[in-house]
Image (tube, coloured by chain):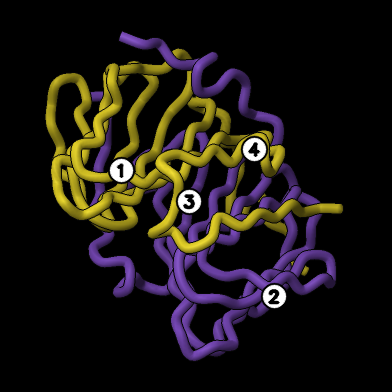
Chain colours: A yellow, B purple
């Protein structure tokens, strides 16, 4: 079978962090779905050895910090962070912030979209 | 600089399809943000040579077809499709369907999360 499917339910009711890699047997990325309520902040900064991360803010607003620079983010903000960037994310606001984090190996994508697709 | 940032604006007002790869110089994935209004269907089926795709439905509902099997999808559905899966997506409903497609090279992810992160 060429697909795997899961149901997260209504996104406003997400658990704080749901990882998709193991549930879907992903082989090209890890994806986490996140709901950050008021006061959320990862309790440590981190960087990566080999992986690039993309943060997509789906709802609410807050801050992503990279190498000491605090970026305002809100619904529709997308931030790519190279492995070396020292990062954190926080939500000091009343409204929950929903966001997705996609982790892939830096430099791993070869052809894509038109180049990789076969139209049938 | 270790980050790049862009703003898509309110997701309900997205263009039909916005690709992120070139705007953010992504190197591990292509990501498209999609808004499918009533009657949307890709005008052809397609599969991939090397890339795995993950569809995340953010809002609304519709169908993803894989190898002739029609899967009902709705807010919170996530579907991974292997390169060989012949696929399409459609929205026959009045409500717009918002979804993300993440394309990565199959088998490209090595360590991730705890294994790839350096806690600081």
- Helix, strand or loop for disc 4: strand
Residue position marked by numbered label 3 in the rendering: B31
Residue under the point 55% across and 22% down: B112
Task: Give the image location of residue B88, x and y in percent.
Answer: 69, 70
Disc 1 to disc 2, C-alpha distance: 39 Å
Mark 1 chain: A
Residue under the point 61% across and 51% down: B54
Disc 4 to disc 2, C-alpha distance: 22 Å
Residue position marked by numbered label 1 in the rendering: A36
- Helix, strand or loop for disc 1: strand
Tell me which numbered mark, 3 or 4, is placed earlier along the sequence.
3
Task: Give the image location of residue A75, x and y in percent.
Answer: 25, 57
Disc 3 to disc 1, C-alpha distance: 23 Å
Q: Which of pointers 4 and 1 indicates the residue nearer the eye?
A: 1
Q: Which of pointers 2 and 3 indicates the residue nearer the eye?
A: 3
Task: Give the image location of residue A96, x and y in percent.
Answer: 26, 52
Mark 2 chain: B
Task: Give the image location of residue B29, x and y in percent.
Answer: 52, 41
Residue position marked by numbered label 2 in the rendering: B44
Specify whether disc 4 shares its chain with disc 1: no
- Compared across the picture, whether A65 is left or right of B56 comes to left
């Amino acid at each position: 079978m060429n697909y795997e499917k899961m149901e997260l339910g209504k996104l406003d009711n997400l658990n704080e962090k749901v990882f998709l890699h193991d549930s879907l047997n992903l082989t090209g990325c890890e994806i986490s779905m996140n709901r950050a309520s008021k006061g959320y902040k990862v309790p440590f900064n981190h960087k990566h050895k080999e992986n690039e991360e993309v943060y997509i803010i789906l709802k609410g607003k807050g801050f992503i910090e990279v190498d000491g620079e605090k970026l305002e983010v809100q619904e529709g903000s997308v931030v790519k962070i190279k492995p070396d960037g020292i990062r954190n994310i926080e939500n000091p606001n009343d409204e929950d912030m929903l966001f997705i984090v996609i982790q892939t190996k830096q430099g791993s994508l070869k052809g894509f979209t038109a180049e990789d697709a076969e139209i049938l």
